[in-house]
Image: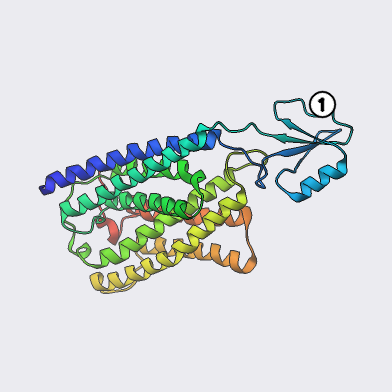
Amino acid sequence: MSAEQLAGLSDDLVLGAVLLYLAAMIGFALELAFGRARTNTGATALTVTEPGVKESVAAGSSMAAGSSMAAGSSVAARSSGGIGEGAEAGATVAVSPPEPPSWAPKAGTVGLIFGWVGLAANLGSVVTRGLAVGRWPWGNMYEFVVAICLAAVAAFLITQLRSNVRFLGAFVMVTAALGLGFAVIWLHVQAGPVVPALNSYWIAIHVSAAVIASGLFTVGGVSGILYLVRGEGFSRLPTRTDLERVAHRAIVLAFPVWTFAVIAGALWADKAWGRYWGWDPKEIWAFITWIVYAGYLHARATAGWKGRAATIVQLVAFACLLFNLVGVNIFLGGLHSYADVGG
């Protein structure tokens, strides 16, 4: 195939990846919307103690079972049933949400299949773009964003192989689809050569590390947003503890990779421009991102920060990352302005 045909195929695969990611998002969303609801502690039922209808988390723990026995008689009821009917005064009534339909998990499985096929299309778009231009395919903002979407989805799907994080699927997939759509509409540039500063083996080292770290940080950022959205009581989102654990693990993996990317960028700057650090806007915001993520990890490790406060810190770091990846090139420019932004 000619370079033009490969470039066209790459663009078509990006559009295909968008559609596949949206299909995967629908499957994951259906499972999330109609799956089993839980309380914020992971329980699948609530207890309502009469009189006064005072709610407390009960199902799923041995402590709740003991308190139910001590209270007298306990009556299991569906949330649609009459709470307290036939129960003695002071009795504990366990209220369970309706059982999810049998097709809900199947919808999530279908979403997972679409996700893997979409990842293959996304990977194919990167490979064919690289073959079309005869270089590493992240020499401008369009190629970089496409690669980050690939890394984010890959991070989610690989994590899913080790532990059940399908609850993130709808949100990761819509983030990737929106990212690719943004790249196609506003960042797209024609396949072609790059400036001499980018024609270096350092692009395979520095930018690859930045892409991998950004993909992992995206998984952490999505988990952090869901943590803040997740309310008390019944929800089909996982517990805040689970969401925080996923975010923390993603950031722990991503931080050393981002650190390496910053160091490799300094080494590349010395080779390209004759200095390791010049306070270019991209360098400044890469360092700010590193500082805020380091603060998040330090606060968790030494001061024991957890929960909402730690989540807000990591989301501030994620916002810095997004501005560094896209905003700096659009609004600030600098020596990194050679990473073209399409019109």
Q: Position of residue 203 (x, y in %)?
A: 26, 63
Residue at the image point whose x is 50% and y is 32% from the top: 103
- Is 109 rendered above or below residue 328? above
- How many callouts does the rendering have? 1
Q: Where, quadrant-wise, is the C terminus in this rendering?
A: top left
Residue at the image point whose x is 42% and y is 39% from the top: 111
In the foreground, 118 or 253: 118
Q: Is residue 339 left or right of residue 149?
A: left
Residue 178 visible, this angle:
no
Q: Position of residue 164 (x, y in %)?
A: 51, 49
In the foreground, 123 or 315: 123
Residue at the image point whose x is 82% and y is 46% from the top: 67
Q: Is residue 154 left or right of residue 194?
A: right
Q: Position of residue 298 (x, y in %)?
A: 56, 67
What element does badge 1 sit on? loop
**Residue at the limit of the structure toward the left, as seen here:** 2
Q: Is residue 144 left or right of residue 286?
A: left
- Tell me where residue 196 sits by quadrant: bottom left
Q: Is residue 170 left or right of residue 298?
A: left
- Amino acid beneath label 1: Glu
Q: Position of residue 30 (x, y in %)?
A: 49, 34
* Residue placed under numbered mark 1 in the picture: 85
